[in-house]
Amino acid sequence: MKAYVFPGQGAQFVGMGKDLYDNNSIAKEMFTKANEILGFDITAIMFSGTDEELKQTKVTQPAIFLHSTILAACLGDSFQPDMVAGHSLGELSALVANKALSFEDGLRIVSKRALAMQEACEKEPSTMAAIIGLDDEVVEKVCEEVDGIVVAANYNCPGQLVISGAFSAVEKACEMLTEVGARRALMLPVGGAFHSPLMESAREELAAAIDATEFSEPTCPVYQNVPASAVSDSADIKKNLVAQLTSPVRWTQTMHAMIADGAEEVIEVGPGKVLQGLFKKVDRKFPTSSAEI
């Protein structure tokens, strides 16, 4: 069985998608439509902007979504997933790819999501940190002991968990985790506490946008971040998509579930190879590749 997976924020690079635009009429049409929907020339930033321009949340999230969904569309009949999943933002790319959501509606939701998250980040100094070399249970226990808001946010792979919360609480958690044996506790250069209770205002805005959007039955199951299991019911998909903003990305658990349910190879659709690397951390012999036209 083939599993197609879609990356999240952080996979972006200047020049992403330009080959698709230059060499494929479907891609060119979709990129042009995206500029109209967003109301600014995102293709100019993606293809020839600066790193700083591309790092703006309002640009980064739509840019990665566009690269992934347009690449999937350009694969044509060769795109035959038995299951899909996406890491955080990538879940929306996966839902467009498996026909649960239209490209246009997906892009509108991604844009609202990015702007709402940016606003939430500006309300309180907050951040994230990568914790390397500890069992998940140890990280969770230390976070519970810290005064202030700090939670496990991204279960990326065995031995790699990202925590998220108020700046001072994350700093304190990093000190305590280093003391109990973390190989690294690295503060990340991000603008806020994604997948934590501090995203509540963004979750409320996203809920309104998702409630107003029509979702269809998907062509194959999507393994969503919140339950880390296969979901096919459109009402459940919408509920999990809203909950994702304040809940952890359970990617480690998602990978195990996909493999247990019969995934025999993973194809990453979008910029970079981050998700392929995470699957290799679960099983270094597991077949992975990048989607290519």
Image (cartoon, rainbow, N blue to C red):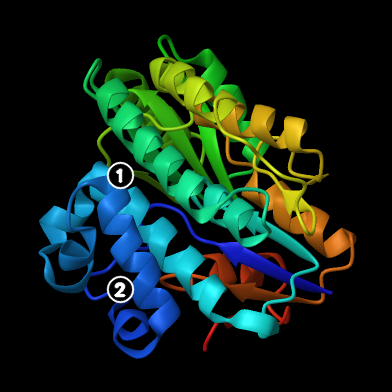
Q: Is residue 33 left or right of residue 206?
A: left
Asked if 288 appears above or below 145 in the picture, the reply is below
Q: Amino acid at mark 1?
A: Leu
Query: Would residue 189 be seen by someone viewing this image from the given angle?
Result: no
Which residue is at 68% across, 83% downward? 77
Which residue is at 26% across, 24% downward? 119
Which residue is at 75% across, 30% downward? 235
Q: Position of residue 115 (x, y in %)?
A: 29, 33
In front of the other: 170 or 182: 170
Residue denoted by label 2: 16
Q: Amino acid at mark 2?
A: Met
Q: In the structure shown, which secondary structural element does the residue marked by tag 2 occupy?
A: loop
Q: Position of residue 71 (x, y in %)?
A: 48, 74
Q: In the structure shown, which secondary structural element does the residue marked by tag 1 occupy?
A: loop
Q: Categorize mark 2 by other alpha carbons within 10 Å: few (<14), some (14-19), many (20+).
A: many
Asked if 19 appears above or below 38 in the picture, the reply is below
**Label 1 vs 2, first from the N-terminus:** 2
Which residue is at 52% across, 35% downward? 153
Q: What's the distance in space between the residues labelled 1 and 2, CA to CA?
A: 23 Å
Residue denoted by label 1: 188
Q: Quadrant of the N terminus?
A: bottom right
Q: Nearer the viewer, mark 1 or mark 2?
A: 2
Q: Categorize mark 1 by other alpha carbons within 10 Å: few (<14), some (14-19), many (20+).
A: some
Q: Position of residue 263 (x, y in %)?
A: 82, 69
Asked if 225 appears above or below 102 in the picture, the reply is above
In front of the other: 40 or 146: 40
Query: Would residue 114 be seen by someone viewing this image from the given angle?
Result: yes
Asked if 217 appears above or below 71 in the picture, the reply is above
In front of the other: 43 or 191: 43
Query: How many marks on residues?
Result: 2
